[in-house]
Image (cartoon, rainbow, N blue to C red):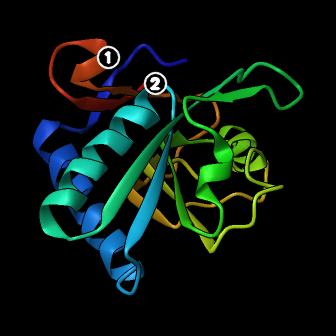
Amino acid sequence: MSEKKVLILNQEQIQKKTIRIAYQLLEDNFSEKSLVLVGIAERGYIFAQRLKAILERISGLDIQLIKVTLDKTSRTLDAHTDNPIEQVKNKVVILVDDVLNSGRTLAYGMGIFFNVPLKKMRTVVLIDRSHHKFPIFSDFSGLKLSTILKEHVTVNLHECDGGEDAAWLQ
């Protein structure tokens, strides 16, 4: 991993990209009365909370929020939710994470819903690194970034990391 740390998104840019994604979600779901945001712990859930707050402010949609905790090191799906998954039946589900790298985390997040009939599912990430090992792609992203494999993206969100929101490439 490189010792050099390059700022790729500052607090203002993260805020603007979050607002833009919320409007894109609203446009993609203009005929819906409700949405379910599913945030992958920890930063994906915080990002989902922010999207929820904006969507509630700009629309009349009923927004439900679910937190998914995954064991990202496991070779099998080991996930837990803070609400019963059955309550999303026949609804629009938006799976949210901070960074899409290989696609494994989003694939595990999607796996939770395989036995639940959904109206549709979309994926949202703040940063899409384009190093997909799985056929998982973001429907909405704040930034698509081409990096080399040994580089790493770090996202700092005030609610879990303290300090100002920012994203860096190392």
Labelled pair 1, 2 in contact (Cβ < 8 Å) = yes
Frontmost residue, 20 versus 112: 112
On screen, 85 above or below 115?
Answer: above
Of the numbered discs in the image, which one, if any, rests on residue 42? 2
As drawn, the label of residue 146 is none
**Mark 1 Cα shell of 10 Å, populated few (<14), some (14-19), many (≥20):** few
Q: Which residue is mark 1?
A: 160
Q: Quadrant of the N terminus?
A: top right
The image quarter containing residue 19 is: bottom left
Residue depicted at x 48% and y 19%: 2
Using a 10 Å C-alpha cutoff, classify the residue at mark 2 as few (fewer than 14 neighbours), some (14 to 19) or many (20 or more): some
Say what amino acid the circle numbered 1 marks. Cys
Question: Is 130 left or right of 38, judged from the image as shown?
Answer: right
- Cα–Cα span, label 1 and label 2: 7 Å
Disc 1 is placed on an element classified as helix
Instruction: Depth check: give the residue in front, 58 or 162.
Output: 58
Q: Tell me if 121 is positioned left or right of 17 in this view.
A: right
Q: Residue at x 24, y 55 (%)?
A: 17
Q: Quadrant of residue 26?
A: bottom left
- Quadrant including the C terminus: top left
Residue 28 place in picture, x, y as percent = 41, 80
Helix, strand or loop for disc 2: loop
Above or below, comparing residue 48 to residue 34 in the picture: above
> Looking at the rendering, which quadrant does residue 61 occupy?
bottom left
